[in-house]
Amino acid sequence: MDRGEAERFIRQFHHEQPTAGDAAPRVRAVLAEIGRTGTYEHTADELAFGARVAWRNSARCIGRLYWRSLVVRDLRHVTSADDIAAHCFEHLRQAGNGGRIRPVISVFAPDRPGRPGPRIVNDQLVRYAGHRTPEGPWSGDPRGGPLTARAVGLGWKRDQEAFQILPLMVRERPDARPEWYELPDDSVLEVPLSHPDHAWFASLGLRWYAVPAISDMTLEIGGVRYAAAPFNGWYMGTEIGARNLADGERYDLLPVVADRLGLDRSAERTLWRDRALVELNVAVLHSFHEAGVTMADHHTESQRFLRHIERESRHGRETPADWSWIVPPVSGSATPVFHRYYDPVDPSLRPAFLART
């Protein structure tokens, strides 16, 4: 345990939360606890503050304007795989909220000296399965291929459906065999995709889930690591329309959509990819709106991000940002986030969501 990291966080908490009072007594208590046990326990308020600031510090996220609104579920007492899975399903229900998506994080037991905490194997709580068919092409989402193979190895049965939801896989500790759990129907909100101008689009049978809950990152707050801490915001349309469904390494739907639109694919100069990509994104935004499910378009979210930067500047804080992630994958130069530089990303910035090691 890094005593300096712990002290810095406690002082930051007390600085940004004036009602918390003088930091000195709490610093002394934390350092004494580290001396006795090798770690320390956050208060509920410290945990909530740390999780929200970790979102604020996430350089790859364009949706940080609402970081203060993150709902923090303190589940540090939960350690069994069965209970973790049940709480993950409840996380999806609360975040889905009937379509009015809420940012939520569920924080399970942390790593402690000699007692590592639980791990969620899945990279997202909801992910579609994918596997190669005997003929060679992919069935489903290639991104889900490794998880699909792992789940099948544990006894799960896959099918040929293009949008089959993978089970949730949980380890009670890093060296434990994963337990797997089918997601209850009422925990997964999905949106069938249609197009406002092309009735044939619905016949493609496309859909996507509403809550993008990341579950394979470690939340680090003041030196304490929570390796099982799934969190979500809401989707920006391009994440689905320009990446998940369009990328050649994912569902690769641009040729299918272009052919249904009657576009000329004989040469790249016809810009058939670009035209199909726009219509695919129109369908995603239209469908989520018609279903009453929260989704942002990339122009609006770009404007919100600049408001976030302005707000943080008024508080004397920099806003680290990775340009390659902040600029949308569609019409980047038509959005205000394209035409500027950002504060450099400091890999030591904490609290933070870290790639799990």
Image (tube, rainbow, N blue to C red):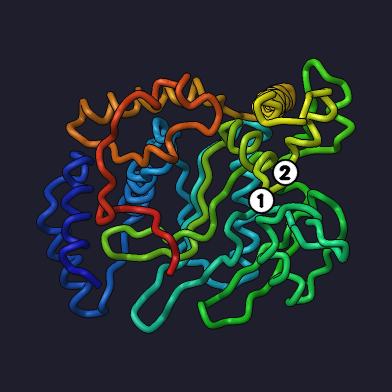
Number of callouts: 2
Give the residue at mark 1. 249
Give the residue at mark 2. 252
Residue 10, quarter of the rendered image: bottom left
Left of 43 or right of it: where is 176?
Answer: right
- Nearest the viewer among 44 and 67 is 67
Left of 4 or right of it: where is 275?
Answer: right
Q: Residue at x 69, y 72 (%)?
A: 150
Describe the element under mark 1 as helix, strand or loop: loop
Measured as percent of width and height from the top left, residue 29 is found at 17, 66
Describe the element under mark 2 as helix, strand or loop: loop
Against 351, residue 81 (above or below) is: below
C-alpha distance separating marks 1 and 2: 7 Å
Q: Residue at x 87, y 57 (%)?
A: 160
Q: Residue at x 78, y 25 (%)?
A: 264
Against 113, residue 78 (above or below) is: above
Q: Residues within 10 Å of mark 2 (few under 14, many from 20)?
A: some
Callout 1 touching callout 2 (CB < 8 Å): yes
Kindly identify the amino acid type of the residue bearing the numbered disc 1: Glu
